[in-house]
Image: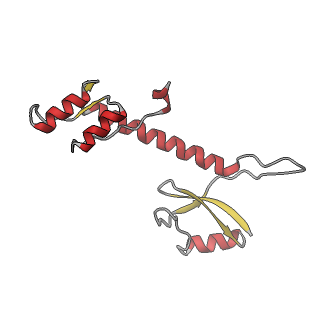
């Protein structure tokens, strides 16, 4: 038996066991190897480094660590693109966000796409009042 780290054309990573490499090739060519996340049959083996373990030493992260790093990088890039899109298409009202959002909801201010800052309690209150708000995902750099 052999375990392969696999990846689909959509960037999802997963693992699967095969009796041997020829069985993997036959199953993949027959469309029988599919991504468990999206169902894509456009699947290829991920780059794998053999883990040589001896004595009391444990194997390093291996291919799972590489796939996880790729996923984190892709997620970070997606969040960065989303934030750029939001920043390019909204007005920054800063700390006035709760007041401006309420005024827009009440019809006292013209509707427009805004962004700003609100405490968790202020955001919760807006949601309870029926004001549509959505947090913008933060990047690790924003926390420093």
Return the residue nearer the eye: 107 or 124.
124
Above or below, comparing residue 111 to residue 23 in the picture: above
State which quadrant residue 29 falls in.
Answer: bottom right
Please state the horizontal and vertical placement of residue 44, each as a whole percent of the image.
58, 60
Residue 124 in view (yes/no): yes
- At x 53%, y 47%, the residue is 71
Please state the horizontal and vertical placement of residue 47, each as a whole percent of the image.
65, 52
Q: Count the marks: how many?
A: 0
Indicate left or right for 35 with 127 as reference: right
- At x 50%, y 24%, the residue is 144
Above or below, comparing residue 65 to residue 33 in the picture: above
* Rendered-image quadrant of the N terminus: bottom right
> Coloured how?
secondary structure
- At x 31%, y 36%, the residue is 123
Return the residue nearer the eye: 107 or 115.
107
State which quadrant residue 105 falls in.
Answer: top left
- At x 40%, y 38%, the residue is 137
Return the residue nearer the eye: 137 or 49.
137
């Amino acid at each position: 038996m052999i375990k392969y780290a696999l990846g689909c054309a959509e960037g999802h990573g997963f693992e699967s066991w095969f009796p041997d490499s020829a069985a993997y090739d036959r199953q993949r060519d027959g469309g029988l190897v599919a991504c468990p996340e999206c169902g894509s049959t456009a699947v290829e083996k991920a780059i794998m480094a053999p883990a040589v373990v001896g004595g009391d030493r444990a194997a390093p992260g291996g291919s799972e660590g590489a796939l996880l790093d790729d996923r984190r990088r892709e997620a970070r890039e997606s969040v960065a693109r989303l934030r750029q899109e939001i920043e390019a298409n909204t007005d920054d009202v800063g700390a006035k966000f709760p007041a401006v959002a309420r005024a827009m909801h009440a019809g006292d201010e013209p509707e427009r796409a805004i962004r700003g800052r609100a405490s968790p309690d202020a955001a919760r209150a807006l949601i309870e009042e029926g004001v549509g708000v959505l947090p913008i995902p933060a990047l690790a750099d924003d926390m420093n």
